[in-house]
Amino acid sequence: MLDAVLDVRLGRLHLDAVTIQASAGTTIAIVGPNGAGKTTVLRVLAGLVPLERGHVTLDGTVLDGPGVGAWLEPEARPVGFVFQDLLLFPHLSVLENVAFGPRCRGVRRPEARRRAAGWLERLGIDGFGVERPGALSGGQAQRVALARALATDPRLLLLDEPLSALDAGTRPSVRRDLARHLDTFAGVAVVVTHDPLEAMALADRIVVLEDGRVTQVGNAAELRERPRSSYVAEFVGVNLYRGTADGDGVVLANGARVVGGDGSVRGDALAVVHPRAVALHRSRPDGTPRNVWAGKIRHVDPEGERARVHVDAAVPVTAEVTASSLAELGLDEGTPVWASVKATEVAVFEA
Amino acid sequence: MIAIVVAAVAIAFFAAPLVGLLLRAPWGSLWDELSAPETVEALKLSLICSLAATVLSVVFGVPLAWVLARQQFPGRRLARALVTLPMVLPPVVGGVALFLAFGRRGFIGQELDDWFGFTLPYTTLGVIVAETFVAMPFFVITVEAALRSVDRRYEEAATTLGSGGITTFRRVTLPLITPSLVAGAALSWARALGEFGATITFAGNLPGKTQTMPLAIFLEFENGNTDGAIALSLVLVLVSMAVLVGLRDRWLRT
């Protein structure tokens, strides 16, 4: 159980009562624009930056509490950190990198090596133990960094943009593996990312951080339905569907199909549709859109010149329409509508 | 064009002494000159003293460089200036100053003498002290620069893995700056090996006790034994060359 309220100033950045709460076994994603303070949140949790006010409490232990004079040195915290640039020690072998944490925590060398080898095996990179980190590919290095962080059996795992160093080709498979490891991780995991897709794929709950403040907390569906800032609407408020890709789109658990993608993805997949790509009609649309879903408007969120319309259908969808077309079509809660999306507007990713 | 000519003159100026040394070298009797007992003694003394000075420079220099690079304290700039001073101070002045501090009547030397019956001037230990005085700054400056430029994030990574300050320094920081440690040690060793002014002023010129190679070269030269001076000089040239070649990646990179 992580319970943190973070208040600290660093140069122009001010983390203003940033509250993060998570129970063991869950993964929290922190998303937000560049410079919002996402990395600083992780650094405070790890103890690399001390708090000015607030507290960090993990499983009932106060790690940092300036109000009560509590402070646990970073090296004494049960925290694992996967850095954005990984920071594998270049002068140590892969095995020694992973064994470094256990060694520092008093485990004898043979035992530390045995544990390290076990972690490398679990992450599918055994056989690279004797290599220097410089000899690894991006995906392998990322797995080593994760193994190194997990090898100390942390109760809080912090990941800073864990996939950003990877090229687009290896990202899906590493993301899938990472999601699997986070699912089995017994403690609290906090992932910083600026990629909403990554956040939704990895996390149970998303904390949106903008300019040092939490602007919204919720799961992907809640953020999509009630985006409280333009950032959330733009970057997090996309329609996201989890299902099975069969080459002609993604089949959801209820059997409904989202057609699109380039057909290259098979198996577990995510389909992404931007609300602006969704058109609404009062009658069944003519023409060629390959996705047409009949449904009923559940809720309308006016947002200045535009409005977000949430439609209950076999494929539940959020559409973003202009205020004028809202009025023109007479869209209101309960109105039956057809939503259409061109197949070319659907992006399909490996999940 | 003019610049090239001037540059050529300057290069010739640096090359000429070396050429002179090689032209006049007594190649035939080189081995005899070098295996003379006094010469072997000077060589041995030089090696022992310069290596001891290098070890002292490393033992004291690493913590000193760390303090200068990483600690904020009042007078840090003054401390760094003090450490750097021997690099620009005429060595003979350094020798006089050492004498005034550590000599038998010096304000520290007197105490040493009174308490331990222990004198530095005109002893082998005095040579080591003089050589350390002039050599250590080279090590400290090199290592301090490395400690400033090393990527501190690796140290943070070590910290999050449970590594305390000293373990991090030993297992992460020092390995990361190994090239600079080696370069600094080599530079200070070369400087100690060639030390003349401070040594002769502070420790005198006693064969077998304080007469190191440079002192022996000077003495041979003064006494008209040019061949002996050249033979010994060639040894030091060789050593200097070896250090240069060893450090070429760091200092001769273009």
Image (cartoon, rainbow, N blue to C red):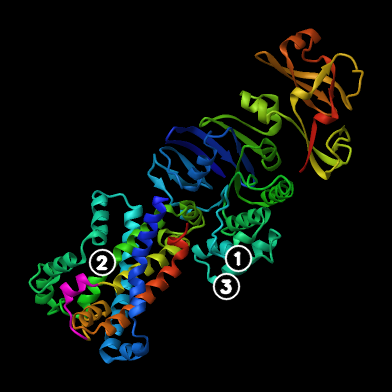
Mark 3 crowd level (few <14, some 14–19, many ≥20, 10 Å Cα): few
- Against A275, residue B149 (above or below) is below
- Tell me if label 1 and label 3 are in contact, CB under 8 Å: no
Mark 1 sits on what residue?
A95
Residue B169 location, x and y as percent? 42, 61
Residue located at (70% from left, 25% from top):
A225
Residue located at (67% from left, 31% from top):
A236
Q: Nearer the viewer, residue A201 or A135?
A: A135
**In this orientation, does residue B167 appear?**
no
**In this orientation, does residue A185 appear?**
yes
In the picture, the quarter occupied by the N terminus of chain A is top right
Say what amino acid the circle numbered 2 marks: Val
Secondary structure under badge 3? helix
Residue A26 location, x and y as percent? 64, 44
The answer for how far apart the CA atoms under marks 1 and 2 are is 43 Å
Mark 1 crowd level (few <14, some 14–19, many ≥20, 10 Å Cα): many
Residue located at (24% from left, 62% from top):
B86
Magenta residue span: B196-207
Give the label, 2 or 3, closer to the camera: 2
Give the total of numbered labels: 3
Secondary structure under badge 1? helix
Say what amino acid the circle numbered 1 marks: Leu
Mark 3 sits on what residue?
A110
